[in-house]
Image (cartoon, rainbow, N blue to C red):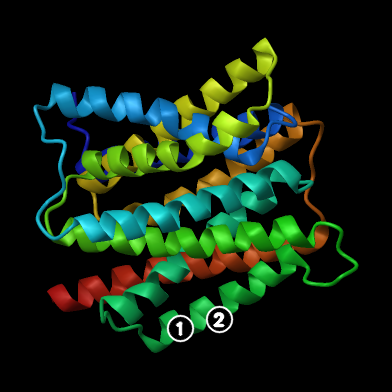
Amino acid sequence: MAKVSDRTKGIICILISALSFSGMSSFINLSGDVPVFQKVFFRNLVAVFIAIVTLLKNHEQFKPQKGCLKYHLIRSTAGLVGVLGNFYATTKMASTADAAILNKMSPFFTLIFSAIFLKEKVKPKQAIAIGIAFVGAMFVIKPTMANPQILPSVCGFIGGVCAGGAYTCVRHMGNKGENGRFTVFFFSLFSCLTTAPYLIFNFHPMTKQQWIYLIMVGVCAAGGQFAITAAYTFAPSREISIYDYSNVIFTAISGYFFLGGQVPDLWSFVGYFIICAMAVWMFLYNNKVHISKKS
């Protein structure tokens, strides 16, 4: 039997992650009128327990690497705002695929934040891709007062921006040797503790079905987090990151079949095409640069 390459394992893991996050989006929507803070709490509660079990199983410490605590706090704050924005957009927008593609703006903002804070150079072609992707996002957001979904669209976009900032911190901590499983644990615990006061004073009673849906939100989110962490341990981002955009396809399919026949409008499809095209361009460009450096 032929041995499966690390690149193939990475692709499989990132597809599992994309499918998991697509399931998370569907369960967020199915859970109905539960407040966003309550949904975010359950999203992270399951991840906390899974992260604890994983750390204990691997006999790993429950403390950050030296010099990483402040970056954990920044990452967790930005990540929580990003999740809130994404959850609000997923709940309120007519198409969950629109919310998903806005969240996929995060890699472009990771480049921007990495240039600002980590002093990593942004090549001219990368800057062009970022600018064109931003135009693509405007087709999805449709920034006019005539758009009744302008607020959730903007929140979804801000979620993508904050996710880009969070990933920049994760990248920086990874360079310092921080354990990815501890990063998941810290973020999940931080998010639970931050959203818990809202639940204490404003808990929204839930039906048995809503409890099940929110537990599944947490299961899917945890599965997505750990799968994408595993993906990047098997292969570098330049080789597999493009496959993460399959999440938009999975989300669109589930939106149509499980969420009342959701179909994005024409302008959203134009935005999807532009953003995904720029992601593919960046993927090919980064690989070309890597090959030229090796030769």
Q: Amino acid at mark 1?
A: Ala
Q: Percent from the top left, x then y, of residue 271? A: 68, 65
Q: In this rendering, is residue 170 above or below 187?
A: below
Q: Which residue is mark 2?
A: 131
Q: Percent from the top left, x then y, of residue 131? A: 55, 81
Label for residue 89? none
Classify residue 272 by image quadrant.
bottom right
Please give the name of the residue rendered at 33% of the width and 71% of the height, measured from the top-left corner. 286
> Marks 2 and 1, how far apart in space?
6 Å
Give whichever of 263, 213 is nearer the camera: 213
Q: CB atoms at circles 2 and 1 under 8 Å apart?
A: yes
Residue 59 is left or right of residue 68, and the answer is left
Give whichever of 58, 201 is nearer the camera: 201
Q: In this rendering, is residue 178 above or below 56?
A: below
Quadrant of the snapshot with the C terminus: bottom left
Q: Which residue is mark 1?
A: 127
Classify residue 139 by image quadrant.
bottom right
Is any atom of residue 20 visible in this view? no
Please give the name of the residue rendered at 59% of the width and 53% of the height, measured from the top-left corner. 85
Kind of element beneath mark 2: helix
Q: In this rendering, is residue 279 above or below 198?
A: below
